Image (tube, helix red, strand yellow):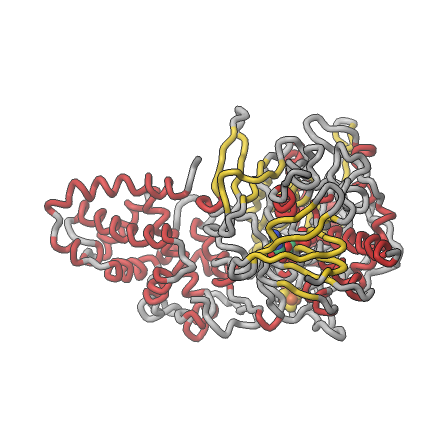
Amino acid sequence: MKTFDICIVGSGAGGSPIAYELSRAGFSVAVFEKGAHYNKTDFSKDEIAVCRRDIYTPDLKDEQHTIVTYNSDGTEEYFSGADEQWSFWNGSMLGGSSNLMSGYFHRLKPDDFKQLSVYGAIDGANVADWPISYSDLEPYYTKVEQIVGVSGRVVEHAHQEPRSTKDFAYPPTEEQPMSGWIDEACKKLGFTSIPIPRAILPYNTELRDGCSYSNFCGSYGCATDAKGSARAALLQRIKYDLFADSFVYKIDADSKQVNQIHYYDKNHKSHSIKAKIFVISAQAHESVRLLMNSKNSDHPDGIGNTHKQLGKNLIFSAGGSGSGRILAKHLDHKKRKELFTRGLFVNRSIQDWYSYSKNNRVIKGGTIDFLYEHANPIVRAIRELRGNDTQVLYGRKLQKRLEFAFKESRVLKFEIFNDWLPTDRCYIGVDDHVRDKFGVNVGKLHLHAHSQDLEVGKYLASKAQMVLEELGAVEIESNISAAPPPNLIAGGCRFGDDPKTSVLDSSCRVHGLDNLYVCDASFMPTGGSVPYTWTIYANSFRVADIILQRLKNG
Amino acid sequence: MKTRRDMLKSAALMPMLLLASTSCSKPPQIKDATFEDTVKILLDDLFPKTDTLPSSSQLNILDYINRVLHSKFTSDDDKLFLKNGATWLNESAVERFDRSFHLLDSKQRGLVIEAILLKRWGESFIISLSSYYFEALLGEPIYGSNIDMVGWKWLNHIGGKPQPTKALF
Ligand SMILES: Cc1cc2nc3c(=O)[nH]c(=O)nc-3n(C[C@H](O)[C@H](O)[C@H](O)COP(=O)(O)OP(=O)(O)OC[C@H]3O[C@@H](n4cnc5c(N)ncnc54)[C@H](O)[C@@H]3O)c2cc1C
Ligand code: SF4
């Protein structure tokens, strides 16, 4: 059996930077991906297939998560993901969910790396400082801008993070006129609107075409490769051994190191692979599950779980979303035309309240992103079934409502990203009673949101609503809830200097195991108040450098 | 543990009892009412033909719904619910007007629709059927109902590119 220099489990944003760097340095790389190998030519904007039948995620009858929530009296409520159609899958395919992301990219801020020191302890939350600082990660954020491709424009504002380069590697994607309207509204309100950086190429490069403004970005694979998915930006540029449709179900580790991993191929036949170094990057919750399911006599509670830290402090992006409807009838001819201009991006964000004061306390706030409602016509039509009332509409009434919704108005949305505080009640384990189609125990998620998450989310939503009001929107609403967004998931393998309170060391290596790294969002002790993917990419490039150095040193 | 299946079952309970109480003297019309008879006319009521929008029959919406009913991408629960919904709708029609739904005049059908919308199963059934109608009308033309992009044109929608070359089912 061939021994690879490096074996990576999971081909998404976490695993691919390591494959990219190691392969380019001449090392042999094996990448395991449980999903299929699609290329850009396989992608279309078929809403029925992609959004209504979820073709890129496993059928919940075959593979699911089970979920535990808490009632107000503290009792637990158990849900089967399959029965509830409650999915925590995000994209099983080469490149992982990064193929389907919208590519709204924000860096963390320096204070995100030392939340405990800056904001202090919070009752009921396990806030911790990171073992690395912003300046350790800054060069890698820059690397992501250049290699994965992040387009944007730097605008100074109170919470602008330090940069080693003056401006972005790529200029911004083309903007929808609404961006200018938001700028004006913010100016009137005294807010600072800033362009949202996007992991989207604005023009053609050697291997990837620029964005065609297809009008259907988030949830869809990109047919031009403009979107900075791990597949388009990294994997297609390197030589490596791909094991697609291959589900890794067990890691074989003794007390010092990992010796091999086991996987099932498409036909459920089991095989093994050996490597010098192993990287697990199956997305936070699935990486934890694999480590737990790999228990043996040396690791009776699962790999990396000597101090019972594995799976703890699972976090999501807290916040929620809101919207308002802009009516065409209030606009002159030019502005009406602008309102309905299709394809281009709104790309506006406000970070004025990334931290703010309340009752003499400095509170960690977050980010507001503005965007148009997704173009998906089926989903939009279904949303109109109740109009702006509670009663289900039908007949001419419904048809008129649809004509109004699609032709006489446009919905401007906002999304709020704030910290989901890590707590003892939000964690992931495995379900001893439920197995997937391979006969492997499924992940069991315990979900809990700290009350501060909701308070901050509501505060930010109230600011976003002011912008919608200033724009003259009607039907303004927001939905800030404790419901976790399954696509923005982190934690579970916290990194830190103390093995008693963390699973990984500062290089994302499992404490006590010489050759096992975990490299997706699971390392994050706190989430920061932005979506995670830029940070996942950047950290993986950082870990790639550490592994590279190690392999070079023999 | 709460499950969606339980929800459907409990929603089903009332009409099932109704069925038991009327099954001995079931009028001939209800036996004759097929799923197609019922859904065809219901779709026309829910989405009437307009100057710009052809009728559901002209758009082959029923064909699409039949494909949904035979697709491996539709769960057994959803298939059963769609079929049961049509049966229960007919039972409501018989209970009120002594005839199955497709034999009623439009005013009577309107009253039956209003009545079932007040019930949990009825509202879910109408939402479910309407959602499949939207899939057919506003989905990719390759699925057969958005003929000449009539649904998209009606709502000034421009489809995403590239379009699929093959329907999923
Ligand atoms: C619709 C959508 C929109 C999004 N928009 C944004 C956005 O605008 N901005 C942003 O920052 N983030 C966004 N995200 C989130 C972003 O995609 C993720 O943060 C990122 O891809 C996570 O990287 P990852 O490597 O942890 O997981 P993934 O990229 O999902 O990769 C994990 C891979 O591991 C594979 N895998 C899992 N288990 C195994 C196993 N046992 N064996 C083999 N392979 C395995 C999976 O199939 C998957 O391909 C979005 C996500 C979605 C779904
Ligand atoms: S072409 Fe542009 S809009 Fe379309 S999926 Fe790719 S990045 Fe998104």
Q: Does residue B138 lie above or below B148 as drawn?
A: above
Q: Does residue B55 lie above or below B21 as drawn?
A: below
Q: Residue at x 70, y 35 (%)?
A: A306
B8 relative position to A8: left or right: left
Locate ligand 1 by image quadrant.
Answer: bottom right
Whether residue A330 is visible: no
- Furthest residue in direction front, as rendered: A1
Q: How many marks?
A: 0
Q: Nearer the viewer, residue A267 or B55?
A: A267
A92 relative position to A208: left or right: left
Q: Residue at x 46, y 65 (%)?
A: B139
Whole-percent x, y for residue B95 in the image:
18, 45
- Furthest residue in direction top, as rendered: A73
Q: Does residue A202 lie above or below B80 as drawn?
A: below
Q: Nearer the viewer, residue A437 or A545?
A: A437
Whole-percent x, y for residue B146 in the image:
42, 70
Q: Nearer the viewer, residue B152 or A499?
A: A499
A90 relative position to B20: left or right: right
Q: Residue at x 85, y 54 (%)?
A: A550
Q: Quick one: quadrant of the C terminus of chain A?
A: bottom right
Whether residue A281 is visible: yes
Whole-percent x, y for residue A477 in the image:
57, 44
Whole-percent x, y for residue A258 in the image:
72, 48
Q: Quick one: quadrant of the N terminus of chain A?
A: bottom right
Q: Nearer the viewer, residue A544 or A515?
A: A515
- Which image quarter: residue B60? bottom left
